[in-house]
Amino acid sequence: MAIFRVMFSGQKVLLKTHDGVDVCGFVRNEYVRAQTREEAIEKAERKVLERVRNHEGIVELSDSTLQLTVDDVEEGFPPWKLLANESFIFFDIESAATTKGKDASQ
């Protein structure tokens, strides 16, 4: 079995902020032990969904609103990566869309 890193991006997460609740997106890496790329994606997706559901800053999340995408899968990491609990990196969806629009028009 190999150690895989599966990189996810998610959108439409309701995140508690100092101003109330914002609709955000996130990126996150999950490390899993699997025999195939497909098995790694399945295991990692279950892990990331569980972490999203249990994250104290995320409110009123239903599976129907979350958009989860696999951005990258890599194989060949050391076993200690299975112990890594990397943080979510949250971003404001509206700001990201505005920045992306500016980049496309330049």
Image (cartoon, rainbow, N blue to C red):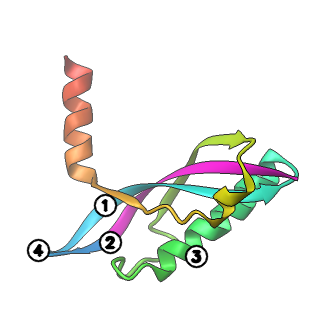
35 drawn magenta: no
Mark 3, residue position: 50
Which of pointers 4 and 2 indicates the residue nearer the eye? 4
| Pointer 4 local density, CA inside 10 Å: few below 14, some 14–19, many at least 20 | few
| Image disc number at residue 19 | 4
Residue 70 is left or right of residue 56, and the answer is right
Tell me which amino acid carries mark 3: Glu
Which mark, residue 24?
A: 1
- Structural distance between the alpha carbons of marks 3 and 4: 26 Å
Q: Is residue 62 above or below residue 104?
A: below
Measure how far apart labels 4 and 2 are at the Cα level: 13 Å
Assign a secondary structure to mark 4: loop
Q: Disc 1 on helix, strand or loop?
A: strand
Query: Is 83 or 4 nearer to us in this picture?
Result: 83
Q: Residue at x 27, y 33 (%)?
A: 100
| Mark 3 or mark 1: whose residue is earlier in sequence | 1
Are there few (<14), some (14-19), or many (20+) residues within 10 Å of tag 1? many
